[in-house]
Amino acid sequence: MASATYEDFILIDNFPASGNPGLVPPPQDGFDGELSHNVLLPWTKPGTKCTVYDETAYGWTTLMYGKASGNLTLGMVCCPVTGVALYTTMAVCTAADGASGMCGIAVKAITTAYHGWFWIGGVCPRDPKLLSAATAALLLAVDSAVNKQAAGQMDAGVLTEFAGTTSLPCGYSLNTP
């Protein structure tokens, strides 16, 4: 596959604990809203998962709340920082992070040491009740043909380039009918 967007992937949640539907409600202003995303004081406990049905993508999506280690941009593939309890702090993935099998994709930019949401399982979120239309459009526009590996970072391009290797940080499948 030469080119793919996040819309083409279904992530496999390899983080511990479950994201039981309905257990943790999504934020009132969406996963990219100012109440819970890119905030210094956490909106909920880092490591909290929220699994909801995305009516636009026709599938379940799981997001996890975490703290950024470094400035993260929308669509950046992130892995848990080694040695931090409960996998609650996320940083840009490198090839060395592949062994954990855990990754999350930032749903919007997050400033270092701030808290926000990471897509970690299921379909790419795009329902307007979950993300603003602008954020969903930007997230879906992240294309692996453009977003290639640079400076050791793992990103959407690496999802296809590393398929079948042990250095892939995410478990995923192609979202095909």
Image (cartoon, rainbow, N blue to C red):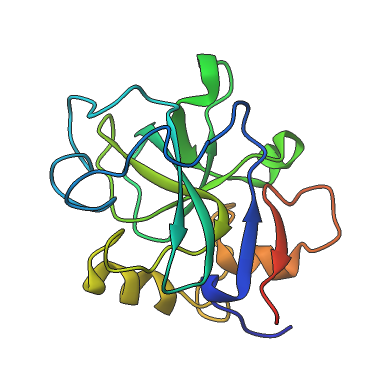
Q: Quarter of the image for the C terminus: give it.
A: bottom right
Quadrant in the rendering for residue 113: top left
Quadrant in the rendering for residue 60: bottom right
Left or right: where 80 falls relative to 139: right
123 up-or-down from 58: above or below: above
At x 79% / y 64%, what residue is drawn? 163
Residue lying furthest front: 22
Q: Which residue is more in the foreground, 37 or 52? A: 52
Q: Which residue is more in the foreground, 96 or 62? A: 62
Quadrant in the rendering for residue 45: top left
Q: Quarter of the image for the N terminus: give it.
A: bottom right
At x 51% / y 55%, what residue is drawn? 61
Residue 168 point in image, percent of width and height: 73, 52
Residue lying furthest bottom: 2
Residue 58 point in image, percent of width and height: 52, 71
Residue lying furthest left: 34
Residue 101 point in image, percent of width and height: 71, 40
Left or right: where 56 falls relative to 58: left
133 up-or-down from 172: above or below: below
Residue 44 point in image, percent of width and height: 29, 26
The answer to whether residue 134 is visible is yes
At x 63% / y 44%, what residue is drawn? 13
The answer to whether residue 68 is visible is no
At x 62% / y 68%, what residue is drawn? 9
Q: Which residue is more in the foreground, 150 or 74? A: 74
Q: Which residue is more in the foreground, 5 or 129? A: 129
> Total marks drawn?
0
Left or right: where 169 falls relative to 62: right
Left or right: where 149 falls relative to 66: right
